[in-house]
Amino acid sequence: MKRAPFLMIAAPLMLAGCSLAPKTALPPPPVPQGWPVGDAYLIESEAALPILSYKQLFTDARLQSLVEQALANNRDLRTAYANLAAARAQVRVSRAAQFPAIGVSASGDYADRGGSGGAGSSFALQGGVTAFELDLFGRLANANAADRDRALATEAASRTVRLSLIADLANAWAAYGADRDLLAIAQETATNARENVRLTKARLDGGVAPRTDLRQAEQILATAEDAIAQQQTAIAQDENLIRLLVGGDVDPALFPASLAEVTPAVAAPPAGMRSEILLRRPDVIQAEYLLRAANADIGVARARLFPTISLTGLLGFASDALSSLFDKGSFAWSAGGNASASIFDFGGRRAGVAVSEAQRDAALASYEGAIQTAFREVADALAVQGTIAERVRAAAANTEAAADTARLSDARYKGGVDSFLASLDAQRSLYAARRSEIATGLLLVQTRIALFSALGGDSSAGSAAR
């Protein structure tokens, strides 16, 4: 009979490990097992791809220095880390609800009754469990699991911010180099246009050329001067963007002088990738943990269908005199419990379960959608990478041919064989060809950066919220 109270308390505690949450079953990735192949794609081997680091692909010390500064100072990344700290703290909050709340209170009073009864004092010290809910159906455990999964999702989101920051900074650095080249082309074109204006004016004054030739030459010059102003603006904006991403001032020596310095500094990711690598992308990991959290929420909603049982306990000492506070007769204890259950709530709690299940289905669709989106981004980048070398070669050949055409047209014009309009058309074609070559070279670099980002490079999936 002496064991009966113990058994009455122990039995509910043993049942507290029950959970009404369904098991999380991740679906197979809704994408093919390999990347597309064909004329537009590079044929990849089936070897495993290691986790990428930006230092493996961004080999220029200047770009690495900018990335390190950005990782230390970027405000968006600081915000993401603060959100992660809050999510981790929330895990500790929900975890604490699974344990008894213990409190201590003390009181004392003194009364002077005057001539009728003299003076008297009393003191009390109490301590015990003020509240403890028996988690018979796993409501508190599932709530903590949901918070933990959300913290892990927040951690993955912070890695997404970090990855995007690195990619954005590399793209801005490359764009700066390309804009420096475009400015040089515009300045060179303007110099040549000024010389043409001078020569055409001299021919006009000598009665050799009509006024239309001069006006057309002036149009070319005005177009080049406008391009110079535009490129100066673009370079200033590139610098502003880099400063924003870095989170502070930037040493001018860290900027590239041209796209020729950028291209070898950004290497292509290694070959040998299978589509399972996408499961390491931070956004896919975030979607997976949100799915797990939604699954745990179902357990919380289901547990609300059952009664809530709470225990309280109190023990302490009470005495009319401080000296006898800890005497044997001063000790007292009490224990109690309560149970509550809703009999009829018009289906509200069952509707709560339905809400959680619908949210789980939405999280599942989001998880699969994240994988499919990741696959498309990588496949698109591979499609460009598979053909970009030919495009770069063709752009260079086009520039060479346009330059030769411009030289020949200018010579034929000066020799009186062709009109000035033919020479101007050749100069316009050369200007467009040179700009196109720069744009294609920039696309080559941007594709490498996009592939690094799409593969979820420079991220680790093994950390946990604490």
Image (tube, rainbow, N blue to C red):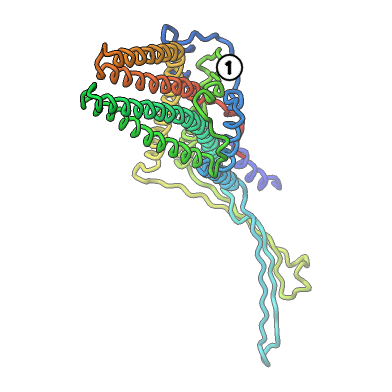
Comparing 417 with 315, the one in front is 417
- In the image, residue 333 above or below residue 320: above
Q: In the figure, is residue 124 to the left or right of 136?
A: right
- In the image, residue 421 above or below residue 2: above
Location of residue 442 (image quadrant)? top left
Residue carrying label 1: 49
Location of residue 213 (image quadrant)? top left
Residue that appears at 33% across and 20% down: 427
Number of on-image labels: 1
- In the image, residue 77 above or below residue 227: below
Residue that appears at 51% across and 41% down: 243
Q: Inspect this view and state whether residue 302 appears.
A: yes
**Image location (x, y in percent) of residue 141:** 56, 39
Residue flagged by tag 1: what amino acid is it? Leu
Residue that appears at 52% across and 38% down: 154
Comparing 429 with 167, the one in front is 429
What is the secondary structure assignment of the residue under circle 1?
A: loop
For the C terminus, which image quadrant? Answer: top right
- In the image, residue 443 above or below residue 64: above
**Image location (x, y in percent) of residue 368:** 43, 24
**Image location (x, y in percent) of residue 362:** 39, 31
Q: Inspect this view and state whether residue 138 appears.
A: no
Name the residue furthest bottom. Answer: 115
**Image location (x, y in percent) of residue 309:** 54, 47
Location of residue 418 (image quadrant)? top left
